[in-house]
């Protein structure tokens, strides 16, 4: 008995269509596998990213307050207390110093330097002089000096230097020995100088002043 195949059950006729269906199914599976892998990687990346989003612990910043400024120093006012017996100087009043064409200017002449009365000079413009000059003074000394006996007996001779002050009125004062020779010659020179007449006083800027004068007195033995 011969078997007869149903045409609808013949697989040879559907071979090409089944082949395409298999290809389509394989492609669909590949697409599903790709999509699933990308989804996993995306999910994994999102997880990592979310982990990176965790903020670090914030440490509060501490600020140190600056010290307060020192209090301003109080100025103390010093009062000058004046007793009742003291005179208080009157306040100076400032005059108007504006100068115009009608203002008169007063010129004040400079006064010469005042000479101190008690000052003793050694060199002045006009030196003091003995009445009659130096020749008259040497003659006066030769006539009035007496050679001391002790100096003659001891053979003492030489020069005694005497200093004195010629006052403003010409008197001789403050007679002293600068260098003596002894034997009574120093005392004799002082005596003679003190007995001198008044000199012509020295002058500084036309005014008489005190002048210190040095005088040598010679003691010579004559044979």
Image (cartoon, rainbow, N blue to C red):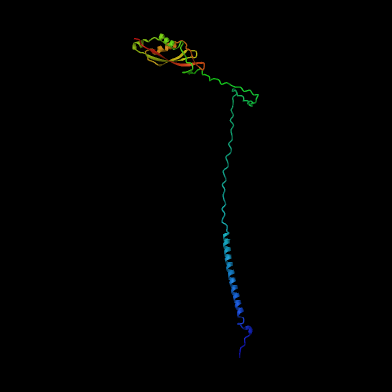
Farthest residue to the right: give it. Answer: 102
Whole-percent x, y for residue 75 in the image: 59, 34
Farthest residue to the top: give it. Answer: 143
Q: Is residue 148 left or right of residue 131?
A: left
Q: Nearer the viewer, residue 48 or 108?
A: 108
Tell me if residue 37 comes above or below residue 74 in the rendering.
below
Residue ID at (59%, 75%): 23
Whole-percent x, y for residue 211 in the image: 47, 16
Q: Is residue 57 left or right of residue 122?
A: right
The quadrant of the picture occupied by the N terminus is bottom right
The quadrant of the picture occupied by the C terminus is top left
Q: Nearer the viewer, residue 207 or 160?
A: 207
Farthest residue to the front: give it. Answer: 101
Q: Is residue 89 left or right of residue 203?
A: right
User: In which image quadrant can residue 88 be found?
Assistant: top right
Tell me if residue 77 comes above or below residue 27 in the rendering.
above
Whole-percent x, y for residue 9 in the image: 62, 83
Residue ID at (57%, 61%): 49
Residue ID at (58%, 67%): 38
Residue ID at (39%, 13%): 218
Tell me if residue 168 comes above or below residue 86 in the rendering.
above
User: In which image quadrant can residue 111 be found?
Assistant: top right
């Amino acid at each position: 008995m011969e078997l007869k195949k149903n045409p609808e059950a013949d697989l040879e006729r559907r071979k090409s269509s089944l082949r395409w269906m298999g290809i389509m199914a394989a492609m669909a599976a590949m697409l599903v596998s790709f999509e699933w892998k990308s989804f996993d990687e995306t999910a994994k990346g999102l997880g990592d990213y979310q982990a990176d989003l965790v903020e670090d612990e914030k440490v509060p910043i501490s600020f140190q307050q600056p010290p307060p400024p020192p209090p301003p120093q109080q100025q103390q006012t010093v009062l000058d207390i004046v007793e009742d017996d003291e005179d208080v100087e009157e306040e100076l009043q400032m005059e108007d110093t504006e100068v115009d064409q009608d203002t008169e200017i007063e010129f004040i002449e400079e006064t010469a330097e005042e000479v101190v009365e008690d000052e003793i000079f050694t060199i002045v413009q006009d030196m003091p002089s003995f009445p009659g000059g130096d020749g008259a003074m040497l003659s006066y000394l030769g006539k009035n000096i007496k050679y001391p006996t002790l100096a003659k007996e001891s053979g003492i001779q030489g020069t005694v230097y005497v200093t004195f002050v010629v006052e403003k009125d010409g008197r001789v004062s403050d007679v002293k020995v600068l260098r003596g020779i002894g034997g009574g010659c120093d005392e004799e020179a002082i005596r003679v100088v003190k007995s001198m007449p008044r000199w012509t006083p020295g002058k500084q800027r036309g005014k008489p002043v005190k002048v210190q004068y040095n005088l040598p007195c010679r003691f010579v033995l004559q044979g």
